[in-house]
Image (spheres, helix red, strand yellow):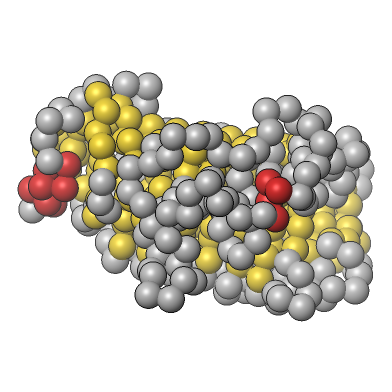
Amino acid sequence: MKKLLRTFLRTPLRGAGWLLFFSLSLFSQSYGGRGWVLDSTLLDARFPAIAEWAKAGVEGGIPDSLETKIAMKITPKANLQKAINKVAKKGGVLLLLPGEYTINEPINLHSGVILRGISKESVILSIKMHGYFWRTVGQTRKGAVLMHGIENAGVENITLKYAAADFEPNDRNSNDASWCIDVFHKPEKRDTTLFVESIWIHQSRNCYVQNCNILWSGSDPIRITLSDHITCRRNYIDRCYNKNDGGMGYYNISNSRYVLICNEKIRRIRHLAIQNFSKYNVIIDNDLEVDINFHDGDAGFNLVQGNRSKIPTWHSWEPISVGVPKQHLPPGDGNILYNNQLVNKAGELVYSNKGAFYQMNTDWNNGVAKEKLQNVD
């Protein structure tokens, strides 16, 4: 992201006794790249979260490919984990040459290592791991590509496809297909061993996933937990096997801060969820066919801006959703919706007045969000 907030347009917004300058384009178009700079003249003491949103994503931005040294090149014949371990000694890029790389057990990325495909069309990580539901006695959550306890690492230009089943996920091909209870509210019984996250980022910092296809995931395509300054951009996410009730099939931001999600295309999963004490995360300029869900007790002050969402009729939620009162906590304070184009299942725009500022409600009794400020001429 170059010169963050230097394109901040000084458009006055009035309402509820407030006057502040809120950006029509809070970020430049190179979201998440090098050169993050906050123009301090744009800060407003009455709206301090702007300064925090400017920090979202990898600190200093994702390095350009020309800045990163290729430490090793491998083909599918090589042992991927051993190659990662070797590159980790000095850091750099592990470049995957064309072919299909079979993943039978978790791959652990290390600090300073960039796992890069020569192109996402030609490099396939074929995930053939199995795992049981993590709430089953004696079972733990499983992931295919793990970024656990690391920093300054990335995954880019790769297709990850879950290939442990000989049948397709249960969903619909048409946005206009009728709703049916089975897709999101009945468990996958054809095979109960498909509970595998595609990418799991945990207790990590300054890591990223970019320019990847993440297809037919076992459960969460991307799971981000207890992490900060993470960037996910320009990825295509489509389908997952387990997305029924019980906490599965999420693009999941949980107990994390300063996560930047931008330029993503997300389809046929359960939720893009922000939850569990997550704060100062930015969801911007994505194309969505799933809901953004302030699911369970986030810590507030998350920004949702400039997204385009069209919810299929067979999806079980509207473009902006929340949890269930008897099971979840309500959204935190200060969550902002701004300049999105959100189309519900009935084909109507919701929370989408141009220049309007919406704030998520923090209780269950007053609807999902309310308009707080509006542009004035």
Residue that protrudes farthest toward the front in the picture: 190
Which of these two is toward me, 37 or 294? 294
- Counting from the top left corner in percent of width and height, residue 219 is at 50, 52
Residue 20 in the image: x percent, y percent? Answer: 78, 59
Q: Residue at x 71, y 48 (%)?
A: 182
How many numbered discs, if any?
A: 0
Vertical placement of residue 287 versus 85, above or below: above
| Viewport quadrant of the C terminus | top right
The answer, for residue 98, to whether it is visible in the render is: yes
247 vs 228, left or right, is right
At a point 27% along the width and 61% down the height, the residue shown is 150
Horizontally, residue 139 falls left or right of residue 94, namely: right
Could you tell me if residue 53 is visible in this image? Answer: no
Q: Is residue 155 left or right of residue 264?
A: left
Q: Is residue 67 above or below residue 296?
A: above
> Measured along the vertical axis of the image, is residue 19 above or below residue 106?
below
- Give the quadrant of residue 17: bottom right
For the point 65% across and 74% down, the residue is 297
- Using the rendered view, name the quadrant where residue 15 is placed: bottom right
Q: In percent of the image, x 21 and y 31: which residue is there?
A: 96
Q: Nearest the camera: 72 or 144?
A: 144
Residue 78 higher or lower than 203, as above or below: above
| Image position of 269 (left or right of 354) | left
- Please state the horizontal and vertical placement of residue 68, each as a whole percent of the image: 22, 37
Residue 250 drawn at (x, y percent):
57, 54
